[in-house]
Image (tube, rainbow, N blue to C red):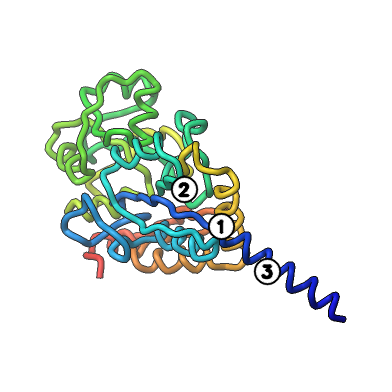
Amino acid sequence: MFGQLGKRCAVAFWGLLSTVVYAETLSVYTFHEPPMNFTEVPNKSLVYGNDIKGFAPDVVREIMKRTGDKGDITIVPWARSYRLLESQPNVVLFSMARTQVRENLFQWVGPLAYSKSFLYVKKGSGISIKSLDDARRLERIGVMPEDSKEQFLKSNGFTNLDYSVQWTTVFKKLILGRVSAMIMTDTDLPINAREAGFDIAEFEPAYLLFITQLYIGFSKSTAPELVQRWQSELDHMKKDGTFKQLAEKWSTYWKVPWVVMDGAVQLGPMDAKISADIKKPVP
């Protein structure tokens, strides 16, 4: 009897010890790009902790709670956080599109969400895009530096890219005719348009470029065992319903029809009422 009890205690002790030994302090970065990660703080260039909101931060916090890893989530400019992910160990960056260009540069945990990356034009512009060659002939395409969609265009030989550091600026350039098109996902467009002060009806998709899979990115030099722990806990969240609950919470908040399919959040059908609600301020 005592032998069995002692054996169970020893197993519990070593299980606890392994959790302590393998818990890490991480540098965890994200960026202001609603709806997945955002802040309501006016200065969005450097934000910490609970001022960072959204579906993806909630998922990351839950994973860290389960693994015991430490680290405050911080919003920093995208280009800076991307460079840190490339060069430093124990760096986490989300939500990142897992693309062919990035595949072997980082380690990945996910997926969190799927979305479609389109070239959008101003409605009524008369611009027709039937191929990448058509897109290359556009005068200018509005992009963000080091964004996955910008990387896709660069890797396909595009030289007509017009850079801005805020999506709000990209929207304004498109409306004013300073760029011919912009590249964005169907998940991001409704919320980012609202944040920029525009009606989503002012834009229309002109060409589908690729399907985006959003993941949590880890620097290549981070211990693979740590990355696997995060993947295991995310898988558990999907099995026990936590992942779906968080998706429903933020779907309600943004008034958009998110559904969980194939283990990730996707944009569901958007009827006229939902489209009208998107124009309203976030409560």
Q: Amino acid at mark 2?
A: Ile
Q: Residue at x 32, y 62 (%)?
A: 49
Which quarter of the rendered picture does the C terminus lie within? Answer: bottom left
Q: Position of residue 252 (x, y in %)?
A: 38, 68
Identify the residue position indicated by label 2 in the image.
216
Tell me, yes or no, if residue 273 can be seen here.
no
Badge 1 is on which residue?
234
Under tag 2, what secondary structure? strand
Q: Nearer the viewer, mark 1 or mark 3?
A: 3
Q: Residue furthest bottom?
A: 1
Where is residue 272, by image quadrant?
bottom left
Position of 46 relative to 185 (above/below): below
Q: Secondary structure at mark 1?
A: helix
Q: Nearer the viewer, residue 149 or 141?
A: 149
| Mark 2 or mark 1: whose residue is earlier in sequence | 2
Residue 60's spot in the image, x, y percent?
Answer: 45, 58
Q: Which residue position is annotated with label 3?
A: 13
Q: Nearer the viewer, mark 2 or mark 3?
A: 3
